Amino acid sequence: MAQVVAAAVYSKGRKVTDITLEQGAEWASREGHFVWIGLHDPGTEELLSLQRQFQLHPLAVEDALLQHTRPKLETFGDALFMVVYSPVLRDDELVFIETQLFAGKGYVISARYGDSPSYAAVRQRCEAQPHMLEHGEDFVLYSLLSFVIENYRPVLDIFHSHLEDMEQRVLNHPLTQADVEGIQSMRRDLLRLRRYLAPQGEICQELQHLDFPFIDKHMRPYFRDVAIHVQRLLEDLTSMREMADHAIEIGLLLEASRQSITQRKFAAWAAILAFPTAIAGIYGMNFHNMPELDWQYGYFGVLGIIAVGCGGLYANFKRMNWL
């Protein structure tokens, strides 16, 4: 259901008043004022109303109505349209919540689709910094982008913790099919995180070079700061994918080592059992000219040889850590 989360007018870093959706264009046209409108799950009616008021480009509105496009930044004259995504974990399932941003001289409009952290905290943070909010639309854009990127850190921390637990499990227990499936699922989610995060870093880099009336050159370092934050997150994603790969490799190496130990034990016992088998085979050849067969203590002597031989083999394999 469409909801106007907040709509307000700002001037010289201070909130002037709350407004209705229909009053936006009137206030945006006043010199030294800008409106900041926040929507949650807006429908066609709300977007078309905003299009009429702020002369939003038809292609931007069309993309907004279609939803689920990749993260991007598009410019239409002196206005811009952005699509960004925030990650959310729901019952261990990774989903991405889309936010669309329209910005131009005198207005910033955010449209959030789905249940992601509310941008009310961003508005409160901005209103608490009037000396920065005085910059206007560009500071609001920076704050919204920064908040979106901040949402990636808790998700990455959870994945990092899961990977560390998985590494410890792999070291202490044989690799199971469930372990392999869990690691592969995490690798797939990490790849999805990169696919959504990387273009948002490119958006911040582009904003550093845009020559728009409402983007002050003094705000460009702030967009660069967000781009640097994205780059660090991407580096962490690369490290975590390597951790996932290493967990599988370590599990396979440990499994091969366990199999090798088992094979050595089988080989050692096979050698020990082969010794009495060989002796039994010799005396089962039914030759007549075997003088020791007539010896009174021949049976006990052969048993003694078997015991000494098997004992010697056992001691030797034990020394070699084969048993």
Image (cartoon, rainbow, N blue to C red):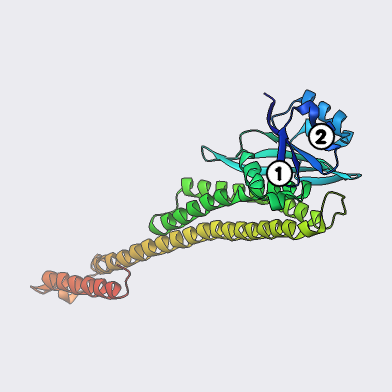
For the residue carrying disc 1, how many other residues have a C-alpha within 10 Å: few (<14), some (14-19), or many (20+)? some
**As drawn, 177 above or below 98:** below
As rendered, which of 230 and 185 lies closer to the eye?
230
Q: Residue at x 80, y 41 (%)?
A: 33
Residue placed most toward the observer, 76 or 193: 76
Percent of width and height locating residue 165? 44, 54
User: Which residue is label 2 attached to?
Assistant: 27
- The CA distance from mark 2 to mark 1 is 14 Å
For the C terminus, the quadrant is: bottom left
x and y percentages locating residue 61 in the rendered image: 83, 33
Q: Can residue 38 be seen in this view?
A: no
Residue appearing at x 13%, y 74% in the figure:
301
Please tell me whether mark 2 sits on a helix, a strand or a loop. helix
Q: How many labels does the image show?
A: 2
Name which of mark 2 and mark 1 comes first in the sequence: 1
Please state which amino acid type lies under the numbered disc 2.
Answer: Trp
Residue occupying image coordinates x 84% and y 42%: 104
Q: Residue at x 62, y 38 (%)?
A: 118
Q: Where is residue 154 in the image (x, y as percent from the top left)?
A: 55, 49
The picture quadrant where one finds residue 225 is bottom right
Compared across the picture, whether 39 is left or right of 80 comes to left
Q: Is 151 located above or below residue 269 in the figure?
A: above
- Residue 291 picture location, percent across and down: 17, 76
Secondary structure found at label 1: strand
**Which of the numbered marks, if any, corresponds to residue 14?**
1
